[in-house]
């Protein structure tokens, strides 16, 4: 009897041990494999079967800068199309004129004409005509081309014409003309091809800036920004009459007129050969100005369409020995800019982006706004590419 009980107990023990063995090496192994598959590559599988990004990756992506490149290469003359839906620009590589969307996608080629050695692009108001300044191999000498986008015609302007601007309507060009026989310099007006010209005013300085005053028949002109040149800013009417001086004895002056013609944002240097710059708000009526307390250049600014705000880049990382704006214009230095919005009348300043969120260094040129003014576009002087900042 005792032997029978022992045999039965031994059999039960064997069955229990066998059951434990099967559980550990079969069912548990299968469960472990499923768990390993669900956590492969550091990702989790949700109930719906969709993968979610690990928390670390979410944190890194949230630090992306709001400033992004729109083009992969250098460009010239980037400008908003008349309807505000696209951007026109000339490629630095071959001078081809393209139309891209606001994200940089090529929409179409506007012209296959190749313009080499581009230096400056000057658009008229309707963006159907353009003056193209090109440079020779040495970079010292330039020539001006008039290009009509409608009929695809190209005309080379005379060698003694430079410093070109378009009239407010965009149907005439205003330029500096140098008469090599009389040695006289004039502000002159003509058709875009150089015909039907007439002189408006005489002056005696070499390099000139010309800009029509918006919503007015007046044309402004002054010496190109130079820290060693005392500036005289003058106005003359479209007819060549009523010439008057509105600003004098400032150094390194440049001006950007507001769309309504009521104000000009003026940049200047504190003294002859100086280092410190400032922006001021000036009335074209009497030349009275008020400092905005903002150290920048007018060429780094753009007005809002309603003339109430000025969007500007403030240059930083400038050596104490720099002469401004000369060293910056001559590309002896590059700036590292921050981005601001200034209320014109009150001078109130607001950062567009915190400095720590700016990834990289940007030296702003030719800024312009999208139609809804929620995006600021600009060319980075350092690489020539077009960038955008979402406001």
Image: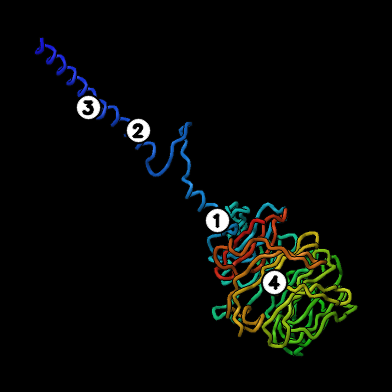
- Checking the image for residue 64, the label placed there is 1
Dot 2 crowding, Cα within 10 Å, few <14, some 14–19, many 20+:
few
24 and 277: which one is in front? 24
For the C terminus, the quadrant is: bottom right
Q: Which mark is residue 34?
A: 2
Seen at 80% across and 83% down, the residue is 232
Corner quadrant of residue 31? top left
Could you say which disc has been placed on residue 21 in the image? 3
Foreground pick, 250 / 294: 294
Reading the image, the residue beneath label 4 is 299
Residue shown at 87% from the left, 74% from the top: 237
Q: Residue at x 76, y 71 (%)?
A: 256
Frontmost of labels 3 and 2 is 3
Q: Earlier in the sequence, mark 1 or mark 3?
A: 3
Front one among 341 and 198? 341
Q: Earlier in the sequence, mark 3 or mark 2?
A: 3
């Amino acid at each position: 009897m005792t032997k029978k009980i022992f045999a039965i107990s031994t059999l039960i023990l064997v069955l229990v041990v066998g059951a434990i063995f099967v559980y550990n090496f079969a069912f548990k192994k299968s469960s472990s494999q499923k768990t390993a598959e669900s956590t492969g590559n550091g990702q989790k599988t949700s109930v719906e079967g969709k993968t979610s990004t690990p928390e670390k990756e979410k944190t890194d992506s949230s630090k992306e800068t709001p400033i992004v490149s729109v083009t992969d290469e250098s460009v010239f003359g980037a400008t908003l199309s008349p309807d505000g839906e696209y951007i026109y620009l000339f490629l630095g590589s071959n001078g081809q004129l393209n139309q891209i969307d606001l994200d940089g996608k090529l929409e179409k080629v506007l012209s296959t004409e190749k313009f080499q050695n581009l230096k400056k692009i000057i658009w008229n108001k309707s963006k159907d005509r353009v003056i193209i300044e090109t440079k020779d191999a040495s970079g010292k000498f330039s020539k001006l081309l008039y290009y009509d986008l409608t009929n695809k015609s190209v005309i080379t302007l005379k060698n003694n014409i430079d410093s070109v601007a378009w009239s407010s309507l965009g149907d005439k060009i205003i330029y500096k003309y140098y008469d090599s026989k009389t040695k006289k310099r004039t502000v002159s007006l003509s058709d875009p091809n150089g015909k039907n010209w007439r002189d408006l005013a005489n002056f005696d300085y070499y390099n000139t800036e010309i800009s029509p005053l918006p919503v007015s028949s007046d044309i402004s002109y002054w010496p190109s920004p130079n820290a060693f040149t005392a500036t005289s800013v003058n106005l003359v009417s479209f007819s060549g009459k009523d010439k008057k001086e509105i600003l004098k004895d400032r150094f390194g002056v440049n001006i950007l007129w507001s769309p309504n013609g009521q104000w000009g944002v003026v940049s200047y240097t504190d003294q002859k050969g100086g280092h410190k710059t400032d922006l001021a708000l000036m009335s074209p009526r009497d030349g009275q100005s008020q400092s905005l307390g903002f150290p920048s250049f007018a060429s780094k600014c753009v007005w809002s369409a309603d003339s109430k705000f000025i969007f500007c880049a403030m240059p930083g990382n400038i050596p104490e020995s720099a002469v401004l704006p000369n060293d910056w214009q001559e590309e002896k230095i590059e700036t590292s800019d921050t981005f601001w919005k200034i209320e014109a009348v009150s001078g109130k300043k607001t950062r567009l982006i915190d400095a720590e969120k700016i990834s990289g260094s940007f030296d702003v040129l030719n800024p312009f706004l999208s139609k809804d003014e929620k995006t600021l576009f600009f060319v980075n002087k350092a690489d020539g590419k077009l960038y955008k900042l979402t406001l």
